[in-house]
Amino acid sequence: MSREVETFAEADRRDAFADVARRTLGSRTLDNKATAAVRGRVRWVNPAWLTLFASVALCLVGVFAIDLTSGLDPDGLSFYAKRQLVFLAIGLVTCAVCMTLHFRNAAYFAWPLAVIVAFLLVFVLLPFVPEWLVLPRKGARRWISLGLFDLQPSELAKVAFVLVTAGYLQFRESYRTFFGLARPMLLAAVPMALILVEPDLGTATLFAPALLAMLVAAGAKLVHLIGTGVAGVAFAAVVVAVSLAAAEQDAYPLLRPHQVERIQAVVERFEGDDRFIDSRGFQGQQALTLVGSGGAFGNSEDKTRAFVRFSGIPEAHNDMIFAVVVNRWGAAGGIVVLVLVALWGLGAVLTAAVTKDPFGRLIVVGFAAFILSQATINIGMTIGLFPITGMTLPFVSYGGSSLVAGFIMVGLICNVGLRRDPHLWRRSFEFDDDET
Amino acid sequence: MKRLRRLIPSMFHRRLALLAIGGVAVVGGLGAQTASLTLTRHHEMLAAAESHLVSERLTPTVRGRILDRKGRVLAEERATFDVLIDYRLLTGEWAYSRAARRARDLHAEDWSKLDRKGREDLIAEQLPAYTDRLERFSRELAGTVGVSVEILDERAGEVRRHVQRTATSVWERWLVARREELNRGRELATEIEVTLADVNKPIREQRQSHALLTGLTEEQAFEVRRLLGRYTDLHLRGGTPGVQLEAGGARSYPLETVDVEVMRDLLPQPLRDADDSPTRVVTVGGLLTRSIGWMREAQSEDIAARSAKRRDMGLERREDLERYLAGDLVGGRGIEATQEERLRGARGSQSVRLDTGETEIIEPIAGEDVRLTIDAMLQARVRAIMDPDVGLARVQPWHATRQGLPMPEGTELYGAAAVLDVSSGDVLALVSTPSFTREQARTEPDRVWNDALRAPWVDRAVAKPYPPGSIIKPLVFVAAVTQGTHALYHDIVCTGALNPERPNRLRCWIFKQNQITHFDQFGEGLRGDMAISVSCNVFFYTVARGLGVDAFDRWMRAFGAGDAFGLGIGPELEGIVGERVDGTRTGLGDTIQMGIGQGPIAWSPLHAADTYATLARGGIRIVPRVLRDDAPRATDLGLDRDAIDMAMRGLELAVTDRYGTGSTLKYPDGSSEPTFNVPGVRVWGKTGTAQAPDLLGEDPDGDGPERRPVLRTGDHSWFVVLAGPEGGAPRYAIAVVMEYAGSGGRVSGPIANQIVRALRDEGYL
């Protein structure tokens, strides 16, 4: 046995974290090389199924909740709920497609995909694009009308970004220096900037935690990350403070008026200032009311339909779906959703843990970071912790682009989970020096 | 760290674990907040959510009427319509926000790229369309209703000014409150600066509708409704209509102005002869305006007070159909204000559960009627008698005493009169001149509120202090006899002054005017009845001195001087007894002065009528009332019956005996006639000529009190009368005071006589 192989074998034995994962998920059979040989390089029993399961469960919760927003007298499933089911089917098919080819192939598609997405992101902003193709909604240009559904390039941008970044980071170590962080950050800055001008501050923000999570997983030095993070947060704080102060003088140098208003609404809610509760605080207040009136175990279906219908809350089936869920099924329902979200994350984390492929590890972490931070921001704004921003709750909210993009991620995560590591695969992102 | 490395040897897995822990923490935080919202704030939020499910329409109620003792309507609700306009339409906020929305829609694609200036320019382009639209609406509305556009604009201006004034005062209050709140407990530290900018959030009035036109008829309302049908775009964000037509009852006061015929036949001779016609018609304006009061628009304070009251009662959460809404009228003064709770009634409501379609109808509750003891026609007659046009309330030649006329002949005199029903304590009339109409209060506010001489806003019958002068004398006598400090039949010799050694102090009026004494006149000492009849000061100085400080005060208070009545018609004077201006206790010298109604004692005409009614009842005091629903409050003062009889005899002599101070009107030509000449009526009475402090005007240059101009000077003229049918007991007590008019007998006497006549004409005698 060569020295190198020995090292890996030892490492494998010591790898308690992975061991635990394998034991709990019955991977002992997978250790049986004979079995593995019989099944090729596919690992049928793997934690990624957990993520798929959580996605489908969240989706079904979503379909029921979306149906509740359709009005008082349901005549079977509502239009939106049915469409969401169709999207679910499309999503599952997409998911399956994403599982077929080995995920490493995605690394080859990453850059072409990124270029296409970048083009689409620029495309929606072009002023001469006819309105039948890009219809501005509420002042934002985010959607390309494709007949059956509207394509939101920023959703694809998330996938592309994760693939490109994972591809960039997988074999490098440069990001372990402070200035080496600049390039990955530049990778994030491009889609962020394009999405910011749509404008879609919420989606743009998501790239930061995704990049951060990937860098953390890839072993970037925590000192650098914390330093950069503190600087970023300080910058954001300055932007917010300046915007709030300028807004008093009716000037909006940095953020747009509606963005400032949403921040003001949260600040006012924490201060107990209810002056603007019917204007800029309206959506947030209605969401809180819906959530709070859910109680421990929720309301009857009719009641929830009535509450949603007459609260006048905008985007109930979409951004505010969590409020509907809690109103119908109470704290219990809300916690089930949160548990499913956690399960989704757990599936992803375990998948990343059991795979050795650096690209696979990073895309799983990147996707999980996107989905979890998006869920956090959405739920957080619904329960009054964050400003209102147009962001969907992944898998639960109505919306084709978001759902399909979500299932692309799930498909790729499952793909990673399904592929057995080749023998003697180098263990990536292990650095012996001080990891902080 | 080492242990961690041993536990998780792979760095990647450690990092994953770190991320996982972060994720779990975040999810846990979200779960905690969700649980906290749903579990701790469930009831509050559920109530809020439920409230969205109910659509409620309020149905109007009718405010109760105010009726006089004979059922005449003094105030009632007339079915009318009001045009309400949202404040934001008046300020241009509506036009601007509509223009802004339009501009944004038109330039949607570049909107987000424009700076403030660019946007303003685009909005300014759109603005004229909306301001023109409002102007056109205003013109058409004016045409529909039949008023000029100027009037409409003026009314809009009034609303704006009113709201701005309210806002300013509300903000100032908030500012003070906020400053206090922030600096509480920081006395030693630097003060936290609070400016108006910190508190100027829009007040309720700035987000409400205000009455632009009121009192529209059914036909006008119909036309306005058609007009509004063409202007459906005048709405605000959220669909609130900017202009609404509302059925709002206008409060009308049918008897505010009445014509009264005054018969000349029993007036003093010079007035009788001045004109050939047997009657004179006097238009009495502002009948009972002060007592009944008026309505004003509900303000934030009313709304806040109402909810505070409900909070105290623990009714906070229940629907309050009595609550005030924007544009509601609330009693502003007088009975309208004090009886607000009874008069107001409660709106009805028709609420529909939007989810189930269930309808709940609560019928409106009409406000209660409030019935007064006042006889509106008697009141009108008394007012007419006291109108300067009739002549009694003007300086006349026969008012002259040896000192001459108090003021130039023809000067208008102002005063008050109260008429009480002896048996019940009911106030039959409560007159104060001059008066004013509600219209005048609105159109000539300076004349009503800023005229120190005429002071129309003061209800002189109950709210202004007058030294009682000699009319207090019978009370002093009865009190002293009851107290046992003065024997009923004890004579006192009038020596011109209480202390003959010091003839310039505490003199008798007769000595002061004619340099003689009542002893000179009658050759004997005076008994109580005679002393009352001739109003001998020395007698009552002596009696009051015997009574002493404490007993005097106690008795006067027992008679009701020093207490308000709680009539429910607005501010009342409590009266002053035995308390100097500086608040110190009085001494015997004051008590001697008070024995003739001077010094530290003052009351209102109603106090005077009340005390005489008590005498007429043989010592039983019934607190006067104006609201018929007030239960009578009676107390027996335990007065000496013989003393009362003697006092009553003195009062009768005063108006019948030739020596009586109130018996005869003497004219400058030497002729005379009895003061009281109404046939078939028996009269008891007492004159009073009370020294009064000068009436001072406003300080013209505002630099100190010493330069205030003297507007009136001299004595107040009192006459209190008890009247009953011939041969019978007294039934009505009448008190008249005319300010700075001089002699009680000459000025107030003929007025009291005409009031007796009015009582007879109205069927009371």
Image (cartoon, coloured by chain):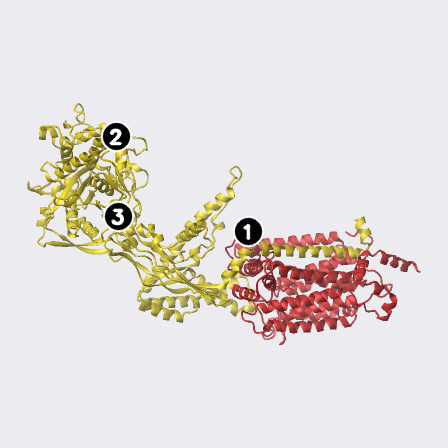
Query: Percent x, y for residue B523?
Result: 9, 28
- Quick check: do tags 1 and 2 share a chain? no
Q: Mark 3 is on which residue type? A: Pro
CA distance separating discs 1 and 2: 63 Å
Is B654 placed above or below B274 here? above
Q: Which mark is residue B194?
A: none
Q: Which mark is residue A271?
A: 1
Is B12 placed above or below B403 here? below
Looking at the image, is mark 2 or mark 3 earlier in the sequence? 3
What is the drawing colour of chain B?
Answer: yellow
Q: Nearer the viewer, residue B106 or B137?
A: B137
Query: Which residue is pictured at 17% across the width and 47% down the height?
Result: B755
Q: Which chain is red?
A: A
Q: Mark 2 is on which residue type? A: Asp
| Any part of residue B480 in sight | yes
Q: Nearer the viewer, residue B744 or B727?
A: B727
Q: Which mark is residue B590?
A: 2
Query: Percent x, y for residue A329?
Result: 61, 62
Of the two numbered discs 1 and 2 in the rendering, the one whose residue sits closer to the viewer: 2
